[in-house]
Image: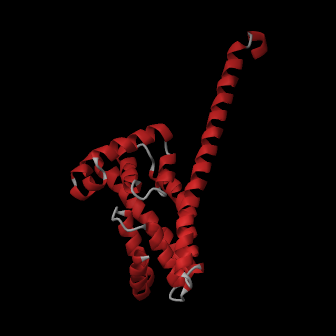
Amino acid sequence: MDTLQILLDYFTGYGYQAVFIVLLVSGFGVPIPEDITLVAGGVISGLGHTNVHMMFLVGMVGVLLGDGVMFAIGRIYGERVLQFRPIARILTPERFAGVQEKFSRYGHWVLFVARFLPGLRSPIFITAGMTRRVPYWRFLLMDGFAALISVPVWVYLGYFGAANLDWLMTWVHRGQSGILIVIAILLLTSYMLYRRRKKCAVAASGDAVNQTPDERR
């Protein structure tokens, strides 16, 4: 509640600009909870200080720009970025090795999941840029798809819960767990579909090999 109240006091005075700046800074790895920031933006809209639909747009631009800058830094500077002390604090050797392992196991879906992992979001985006294997458009697609889930949930939850902050924080905690469950289900479904598609492709390839010359005609 303390973090939420601090953000509310700041946002009430400066509106969209303040929300945008805090989201941008959060995207750079500063430990300010992104979900609470978006909720606070929704709350001030619920209290009549801003328009909730415009707040949603500000939230989308803020999170995508912050994430995009982290990706671009890794892509432009490569491993030289590790010599920059603030980045080195975020992207420790252990995290760097862990992120690379996740990319090799799960591919580009790591970029989607990263939006829901506050402590790993910046390291994953920087590493994705450093590998130079992910086109910028694909990064924006995966990150944008994830943001379309998280941003409206938090902004509109704050909007509808503006009159009762205790009720709101209860649902914030439930929402955090609920989103993670939904993401886990989506990933599991995607993995099962991938395995099934791969199995069908292998079976089709085997049938083609076993065909006689006459059957191939």
Specify whether 204 is left or right of 119: right
Q: How many marks?
A: 0
Q: From this view, report whether residue 125 is shown above or below residue 203.
A: below
Residue drawn at the location 25% of the way across and 59% of the way down? 86
Visual colour scheme: secondary structure
Q: From this view, report whether residue 156 is shown above or below residue 91.
A: below
Q: From this view, report whether residue 154 is shown above or below residue 184.
A: below
Image quadrant where one finds the C terminus: top right
Position in image of residue 92 (x %, y %): 28, 49
Residue drawn at the location 31% of the way across and 44% of the way down? 94
- Residue 217 shows in this picture: no
Image quadrant where one finds the N terminus: bottom left
- Residue 25 shows in this picture: yes
Q: In which quarter of the view is residue 164 placed?
A: bottom right
Between residue 162 and residue 48, name the one nearer to us: 162
Specify whether 123 is left or right of 204: left
Q: From this view, report whether residue 172 is shown above or below residue 190.
A: below
Between residue 139 and residue 125, name the one nearer to us: 125
Q: In which quarter of the view is residue 193 placed?
A: top right
Position in image of residue 194 (x %, y %): 62, 37
Residue drawn at the location 30% of the way across and 47% of the way down? 78
Residue drawn at the location 78% of the way across and 11% of the way down? 214
Position in image of residue 77 (x %, y %): 28, 51
Specify whether 50 is left or right of 65: right
Position in image of residue 11 (x %, y %): 42, 82
